Amino acid sequence: MCGIIGYAGTKNAHGVLIDGLKALEYRGYDSSGLAVFTQGKINTVKAQGKIKNLEALLKEEIGTCGIAHTRWATHGEANVVNAHPHTIGRVTLVHNGIIENADELRQTYQQKGIVFASDTDTETIAALINDFVNQGMCKIDACRRAGKYLKGSYALAILFADEPDTIYAMRKDSPLILGLSDDGNYVASDVSAFLKATNKILELEEHEVVRLTRSQVEIFNQQGKAERDWHTSCRELSGLDKNGFDSYLLKEIHEQPLALSKTIAAYMNDDFNSLEKVMPDLTTVDFIYFVACGSACHAGMLAKHWFEKLAHIRCACECASEFRYGNPPLDQNTLVVLISQSGETADTLAALRMCRKRGIKTVAIVNVEGSSIAKEADVYLPTSAGIEVSVATTKAYTCQVTVLALFCIHAAIQRHQLSIKDQKQLLADLNRLPALMADLIRDDTISQFADQIGNAHDVFFIGRGLDYAQSLEGSLKLKEISYIHSEAYAAGELKHGTISLIEAGTPVLALISDAALAAKTYSNMAEVKARGAKLLLVIREDLYQHQSGIDTYLKLPKVHPLLQGIISIIPYQLLAYHLAKRRGCNLDQPRNLAKSVTVE
């Protein structure tokens, strides 16, 4: 959620930090701040709202070491007082995460005479570290000792008033990445914060503490000084540019054919034989849990249908926040597949660690190499979406769905459930998918429909089977970007209460991509049209039947059923974009939302 950037080097830190914060804007925030050593003292500046407000407050001061932060409010409202950095005594720091025992720590230090200025949990961390330094501990030991007292998650970048031009950092359950460059060294919550300066990186491990200056990076673990290897990030700088589009959202929608091609190419060439080399053995698996949050959970719902139908493996799809508290039945023949764009989603990461403690095999489908989920799962299956800046996921979602489809193909072949005929069709259709997706993105039908429903207060999505899962994703896209209330329903459930909400002019979007369920969904469409709904039909081209009452329709190309879900979401992504733009919404940073949800 929140963003951290720290820099110690030879350049003016104010400019470096502001640029880093701007690169982290996509994560979501409501205030920002920075602290820089100038003339041997720490100068802190904070502002509510956008980074430009912070930038306007900066004076013509020169400093070469500092830390900065974008805050997404949790403890305390979004204002200047609660914005980071926070200072207690000689300690100034920024923090991502949640400290669960903050109230207890606050009471302890208030009794010792500490006056807290904010409502945040972050100030209690500063008080704790400052206390240990005052007791005579060296700064590394003070940080490590504080980590033993803190309950919850944290990524910290810390300045000490008596050690100019030096940054300390530490983490638990929230990412921190170090960057090494010729002009100095960096620490950040996301490599995009310093990717323009360097791609030589190192991911800090749990409970490690780093001491960083312009010329040296020292890492310490519980045993002492640690030797770690730096590596080159594969993230592409081009992902940080809009390339002429009005938003990252539209750019990333248009990037999907290329991202799809890269994802497929990463797993296979001219046949499916290479899947065996990178994907786990499923011959003894008799149950799969797909565990994820948000859009990734909708991808898991598609996978559940596929694996049951094609690979004949029993499955369940659970949102991660519920899975870990439900005491699910897990045994040695159970596989848990965790899906996350960032690889740092707090609930999904916690579910992974629960599985590891119980000895359950895990697979991670993640877009960020080196992320916690990617590193800690037994098997890591990467997507190739590249950097996705817009909070609302588009290309990362379709790449997740693509990897899940390839995973299902692997499972079906390995368990002798996929005929040679089906394999040939899948290969042919996989080769066609990027071009078919590009054609859909260029289709203007959805834009025309958006013009018709731009003033709607409520929108309903209906579908059956796989189309219901896609309807859920379409509804989520619409509400998170355009702020229009929308709901998705299994079409067969309309008569069980929901149809009472349909009245004259209510937009209803129906999706039909499964021949076996087409007639049933047509019947549900007739029911809502009889109540006056404005009806949009998104339908596989060979299933379309002309009927009066359909206000607008868009045809989807026919591909193998396993691949249909990869392209059927495109019209709904475009609808959300067009409606949000017409309503003047922030296309890339919807209110109250964050790209990487690293707190529960």
Image (tube, rainbow, N blue to C red):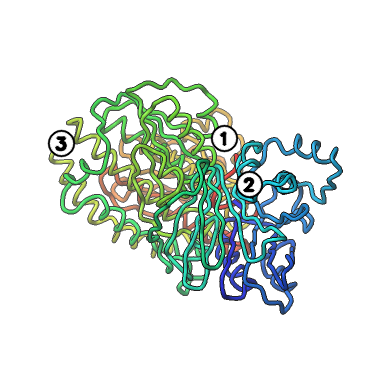
Mark seen at residue 239: none
Q: Nearer the viewer, residue 416 or 97?
A: 97
Q: CA distance from mark 3 to mark 2?
A: 59 Å
**Left or right: where does residue 285 sit relative to residue 593?**
left
Q: Nearer the viewer, residue 190 or 12?
A: 12
Q: Residue at x 39, y 54 (%)?
A: 229
Which residue is identified by label 3?
419
**Residue type at numbered disc 2:** Cys
Q: Is residue 9 above or below residue 494?
A: below
Which residue is identified by label 2?
143
Query: How many callouts does the rendering have?
Result: 3
The C terminus, quarter of image:
top right
Which comes before the other along the chain, label 3 or label 1?
A: 3
**Residue type at numbered disc 1:** Ile
Q: Position of residue 214 (x, y in %)?
A: 55, 68
Q: Residues within 10 Å of mark 1 (few under 14, many from 20)?
A: some
**Residue type at numbered disc 3:** Ser
Q: Nearer the viewer, residue 89 or 308?
A: 89
Q: Nearer the viewer, residue 149 or 543?
A: 149
Q: Residue at x 44, y 39 (%)?
A: 469
Identify the secondary structure beneath mark 3.
Answer: loop
**Left or right: where does residue 291 sit relative to residue 590?**
left
Q: Position of residue 137 (x, y in %)?
A: 67, 46
Identify the secondary structure beneath mark 1.
Answer: helix
Identify the secondary structure beneath mark 2.
Answer: helix
Residue 545 appears in the figure: no
Q: Position of residue 130 (x, y in %)?
A: 73, 48
Q: Residue at x 60, y 64 (%)?
A: 21
Which residue is identified by label 1?
499
